[in-house]
Amino acid sequence: MTSNRQPNSRHCFVCGVDNPFGLHLKFYESAPGEVTADIIVPSHFQGYPGVVHGGVVAAMLDEVAGRALMNGGSPRFMFTARLIVRYHKNVPVEQSLKLTGHTVKSRSRTATATSMIHDAKGELLAEADVLLVEIPPERLEGVDMEKLGWKVYD
């Protein structure tokens, strides 16, 4: 089992290290085609008292699914074309959560992935099926990703 840390960006809502309103998640490659992250969601991201807002849950599921395709030596930068979320139980604020993303199928221009949020006891709270579309390679040609802030931060 590997445990390589993935890069973060500076301003992303989910992973941005400099985003004062963000979640600041750190993602780790835990196995081929699998990425995980641990978080305790602060209470200022709640919808109902004690419950993470559903939009924030969807954002976390979206990000961890997409990052499953960034796993390994040739990461793919993709955008979400479809996100189907199933909320099984309330996702609590101020409690340990585990996010997991898995690559399901990777094709030349598209990919599918799944993502899940579990509580500290391992109970499934929410999951998603995600269809992703590759950003055309020519749009990233010559782009210095580290200069844009895409790197592993300490």
Image (tube, helix red, strand yellow):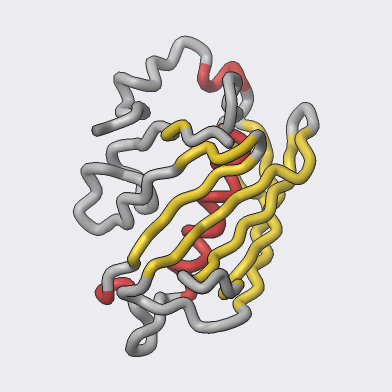
Is 105 placed left or right of 125 in the picture?
A: right
Q: Give the answer, above or below, for where 43 lies relative to 81.
A: below
Give the x, y percent position of residue 98.
Answer: 48, 60
Q: Give the answer, above or below, for where 52 lies relative to 27.
A: below
Q: Which image quadrant: the N terminus?
A: top right
Q: Nearer the viewer, residue 35 or 76?
A: 35
Is 147 placed left or right of 116 in the picture?
A: left
Picture residue at 74% right of the left edge, 31% below the top: 109
Give the x, y percent position of residue 12.
Answer: 36, 45
Q: Which of 37 and 54 is in front in this view?
A: 37
Give the x, y percent position of residue 26.
Answer: 38, 45
Picture residue at 34% right of the left edge, 36% below the top: 9
Q: Looking at this view, name the residue that lies furthest to the bottom.
A: 49
Is 47 placed left or right of 33 in the picture?
A: left
Count of number-bearing discs: 0
Picture residue at 70% right of the left edge, 58% below the top: 129
